[in-house]
């Protein structure tokens, strides 16, 4: 039979300030009866059949609990068998400001009255179905184990005992704030910083798993920074809070569900399993890097469905190393038997990479992402430009069909010599606009045709200006104007091989030889016309300039 090897214990009377030191002369404790006999014979305390002994957390000791006793532990003895008086411990601390509260209970900042040591006083609400002796004893055992853990990344637990309907935890005070607040403040962490914090989490989890303690409630809210420097973390609430809050897949809010594994949500694994904590670590790592949860939803049920059925996906707008994504995938495997264990995590290539290697890989990933975004943007702009030109040509074709004046009619926009191609776009916007239906000034028709908004002119210029020189030549874009096509009445004339050069020259003006003089006359009208608005109802489409430059009636219209 196993026994406890301790040399001395401090025995206090329950509800009394009297205390004595119990020294064990090499005796090994195996049962509570043996301990009670030593208290009676060595300390001369009265004993009755109802005598009880309590741990310093206020939980009655049983035979199995004797195995966890350590040197210098303090025990409380009551020969009458009365309930533990927790006030004798609470009274040692001065309760100060409220640090936080929620569904779990409340947390206060506390100070030891004699030593001035700062502590955190956490009160956790016990649910009705949890208030049986067996479960409270389990909580007490875990509290005793946690008290023995002296790990730099685990919050130190000094006391844990039941006060009425609450569990009171007296813990080490950490004033650096919660990890979730830090991640929200920075909107996600750099990969090197993620790894530094994650390695500390792994070290703390391993220390507890080695003692058979499963956290059950790992999340960013349960990770604190030791100080304002925010370099060392402390994990809180190992095992105890998960038990007290009775967390299952059916009884948690959306925030907590996001960290829970598929097997817990489905009720497939009711026992404490290290794989539960490994899944939660994967969710936490994802959140730290990508500033979002891997499985999201508006309700707990939506989140639950995605955790069970949806594969993990990564945010494209936050490039990361392939090694990090591989580790997260391994931690978020649905099957707990195939999920990464602690050894797989500790020896993973992402954990073993140097900081400089991670930074280099992240920079390369970001550059590749930016190049891809630039390519996609250029393709989208090209597609839009092609669509706009196609729409313009379709509109011109429709106008030609409606007018019936020529076999083919295309759009030409003259560039005035007064506007330099190298000047800003705003300075090149001429108030005159030549379109197939006529010439327009300030949105009013000057010579024939149907009205066209000047915005079409500006938009077309902007599009065609970006056409490469070689493409401009292919599209018959001359230096004197941007031409999408040519107006011709004589198809054979335009298709004649013997006059290709003449036609190519005339492309710069958008005319053929037969109509060249008419087009030049129209151009003269444009040059000589004052830059003032023309009344919308004025019909001057038949006006052409005389040789002297003044306007006169066209004989055809007299």
Image: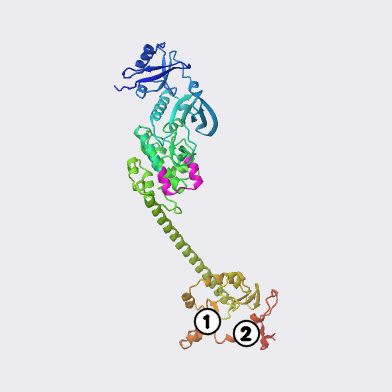
Task: Determine which residue is flagged by label 2.
Answer: 521
Q: Can you say whether 8 is above or below 526 in the image?
A: above
Q: Can residue 506 be seen in this view?
A: yes
Q: Position of residue 8 (x, y in %)?
A: 36, 20
Q: Is residue 189 magenta?
A: yes
The answer to which of 187 and 555 lies nearer the viewer is: 187
Most prominent secondary structure in the magenta stretch?
A: helix
> Residue 53 sits in which quadrant?
top left
- Circle 2 crowding by C-alpha within 10 Å: few under 14, some 14–19, many from 20: some
Mark 1 → mark 2, Cα distance in angstroms: 17 Å
Q: Position of residue 49 (x, y in %)?
A: 40, 11
Task: Determine which residue is flagged by label 1.
Answer: 507
Q: Give the range drawn in magenta.
A: 178-197
> Residue 533 sits in which quadrant?
bottom right
> Residue 132 sits in which quadrant?
top left
Q: Is residue 220 left or right of residue 423?
A: left
What quarter of the picture does the C terminus occupy?
A: bottom right
**Residue at x-position 63% and y-position 83%:** 524
Of mark 1 and mark 2, the one earlier in the sequence is 1
């Amino acid at each position: 039979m196993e026994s406890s090897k301790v040399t001395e214990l401090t025995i206090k009377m329950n509800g009394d300030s009297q205390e004595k030191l119990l020294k064990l002369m090499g005796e090994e404790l195996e049962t509570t009866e043996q301990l009670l006999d030593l208290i009676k014979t060595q300390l001369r305390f009265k004993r009755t059949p109802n005598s009880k002994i309590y741990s310093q957390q206020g939980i009655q000791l049983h035979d199995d609990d004797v195995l966890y006793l350590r040197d210098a532990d303090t025990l409380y003895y009551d020969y009458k068998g009365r309930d533990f008086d927790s006030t004798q411990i609470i009274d040692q601390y001065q309760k100060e400001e409220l640090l936080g509260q929620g569904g779990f209970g409340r947390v206060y900042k506390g100070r030891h009255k004699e030593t001035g040591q700062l502590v955190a006083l956490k009160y956790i609400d016990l649910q009705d179905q949890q208030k049986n002796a067996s479960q409270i004893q389990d909580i007490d055992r875990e509290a005793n184990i946690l008290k023995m853990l002296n790990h730099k990344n685990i919050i130190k637990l000094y006391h844990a005992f039941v006060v009425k309907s609450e569990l009171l935890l007296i813990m080490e005070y950490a004033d650096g704030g919660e990890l979730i607040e830090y991640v929200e403040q920075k909107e996600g962490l750099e990969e090197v910083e993620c790894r530094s914090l994650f390695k500390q989490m792994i070290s703390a989890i391993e220390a507890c798993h080695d003692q058979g303690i499963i956290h059950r409630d790992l999340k960013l809210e349960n990770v604190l920074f030791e100080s304002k420097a925010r370099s060392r973390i402390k994990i809180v609430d190992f095992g105890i809070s998960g038990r007290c809050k009775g967390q299952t897949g059916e009884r948690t809010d959306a925030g907590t569900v996001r960290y829970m594994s598929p097997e817990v949500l489905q009720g497939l694994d009711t026992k404490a399993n290290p794989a539960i904590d490994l899944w939660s670590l994967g969710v936490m790592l994802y959140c730290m890097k990508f500033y979002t949860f891997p499985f999201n939803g508006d309700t707990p049920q939506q989140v639950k469905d995605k955790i069970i059925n949806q594969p993990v996906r990564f945010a494209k707008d936050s490039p990361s190393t392939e090694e990090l994504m591989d580790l997260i995938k391994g931690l978020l495997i649905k099957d707990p038997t195939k999920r990464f264990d602690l050894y797989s995590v500790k020896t993973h290539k992402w954990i073993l990479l140097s900081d400089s290697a991670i930074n280099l890989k992240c920079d390369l990933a970001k550059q590749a992402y930016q190049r891809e975004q630039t390519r996609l943007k250029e393709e989208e702009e090209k597609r839009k430009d092609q669509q706009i030109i196609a729409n313009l040509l379709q509109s011109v074709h429709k106008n030609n069909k409606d007018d019936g004046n020529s076999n083919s009619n295309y759009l030409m926009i003259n560039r005035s010599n007064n506007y330099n191609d190298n000047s800003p776009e705003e300075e090149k916007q001429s108030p005159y606009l030549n379109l197939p239906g006529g010439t327009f000034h300030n949105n009013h028709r000057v010579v024939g045709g149907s009205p066209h908004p000047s915005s079409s002119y500006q938009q077309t210029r902007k599009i065609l200006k970006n056409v490469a020189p070689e493409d401009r030549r292919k599209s018959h874009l001359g230096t004197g104007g941007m031409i999408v096509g040519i107006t011709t009445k004589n198809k054979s004339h335009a298709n004649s091989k013997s006059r290709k050069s003449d036609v190519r020259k005339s492309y710069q003006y958008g005319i053929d030889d037969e109509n060249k003089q008419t087009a030049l006359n129209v151009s003269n009208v444009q040059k000589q016309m004052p830059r003032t608005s023309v009344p919308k109802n004025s019909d001057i489409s038949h006006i052409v300039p005389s040789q002297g430059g003044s306007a006169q009636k066209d004989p055809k219209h007299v």
